[in-house]
């Protein structure tokens, strides 16, 4: 056992040993606490984040809000329709729609409250620079407005798809496919 401990001690003094390399470094100013890790500083992570709607270059703040709102409104309907207290009734899909609309409204209000607080500009991020519209109150307000429009549209589309699934099943039975 003592021999194993001695070998471990000897390996900790060798800089060429990969176990002794620093993995986490300070990104810019070490006093800020912004750390560059192998996950957030990798090229894969940077390319993924740069392709998200919030950071993709060349699109307007209105389109950013619509895209993000559509996605959020669309994926919220299913869980709310499936797991609400009335899930075993004929109203479950409609309750899911109303719940998703309420959640989109709450998220929009949270974005507007954040914009009204006049947030400080972000520290220099490791991954990507946010668009200049996210540095002004009017940019955040336009984003929130279009987020709400997109969220309502996404929830409506998801509800329409869920509500018309039985119609497609009946059509397939009618033509003899199912």
Image (spheres, rainbow, N blue to C red):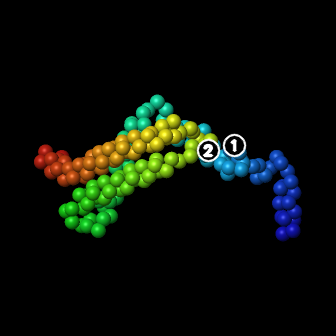
78 w.r.t. 55: above or below: below
Q: Which mark is residue 83?
A: none
Q: Residue at (41%, 43%) from the top-left corner?
A: 141
From the image, tell me which residue sits under label 2: 123
Q: Nearer the viewer, residue 113 or 161?
A: 113
| Left or right, 53 with reference to 163 | right
Q: Nearer the viewer, residue 170 or 94?
A: 94
78 w.r.t. 64: above or below: below
Q: Position of residue 106 (x, y in %)?
A: 37, 55
Q: Residue at (71%, 50%) from the top-left corner?
A: 31
Q: Residue at (68%, 49%) from the top-left corner?
A: 32
Residue at the extreme left of the image, as rendered: 174
From the image, tell me which residue sits under label 1: 28
Q: Position of residue 149 (x, y in %)?
A: 32, 44
| Left or right, 143 with reference to 86 | right
Q: Is residue 71 visible?
A: no
C-beta proximity under 8 Å, tags 2 and 1: yes
Q: Nearer the viewer, residue 7 or 122?
A: 122
Q: Position of residue 130 (x, y in %)?
A: 53, 39
Q: Residue at (72%, 48%) from the top-left corner?
A: 30
Residue at the extreme top of the image, as rendered: 58
Mark 2 vs mark 1, foreground winner is 2
Question: For the residues marked 2 and 1, what is the alpha-carbon distance in whole angstroms?
Answer: 9 Å
Secondary structure at badge 1 equals loop
Q: Is residue 15 visible?
A: yes
44 w.r.t. 163: above or below: above
Secondary structure at badge 2 equals loop
Q: Nearer the viewer, residue 142 or 107?
A: 142
| Left or right, 75 with reference to 55 | left
- In the rendered view of the protein, which quadrant contains the N terminus? bottom right
């Amino acid at each position: 056992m003592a021999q194993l401990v001695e070998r471990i001690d000897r390996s900790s003094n060798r800089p060429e040993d990969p176990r002794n390399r620093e993995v986490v470094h300070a990104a810019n100013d070490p006093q800020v606490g912004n750390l560059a890790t192998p996950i957030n500083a990798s090229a894969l992570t940077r390319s993924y984040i740069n392709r998200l709607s919030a950071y993709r270059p060349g699109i307007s703040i209105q389109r950013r809000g619509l895209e993000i709102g559509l996605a959020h409104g669309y994926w919220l309907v299913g869980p709310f329709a499936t797991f609400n207290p009335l899930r075993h009734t004929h109203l479950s899909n409609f309750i899911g729609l109303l719940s998703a609309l309420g959640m989109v409204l709450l998220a929009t209000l949270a974005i507007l409250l954040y914009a009204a607080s006049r947030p400080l500009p972000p520290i220099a991020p490791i991954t990507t620079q946010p668009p200049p519209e996210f540095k002004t109150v009017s940019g955040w307000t336009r984003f929130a407005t279009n987020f709400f429009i997109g969220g309502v549209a996404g929830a409506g589309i998801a509800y329409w798809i869920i509500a018309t699934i039985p119609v497609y099943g009946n059509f397939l039975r009618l033509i003899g496919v199912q």
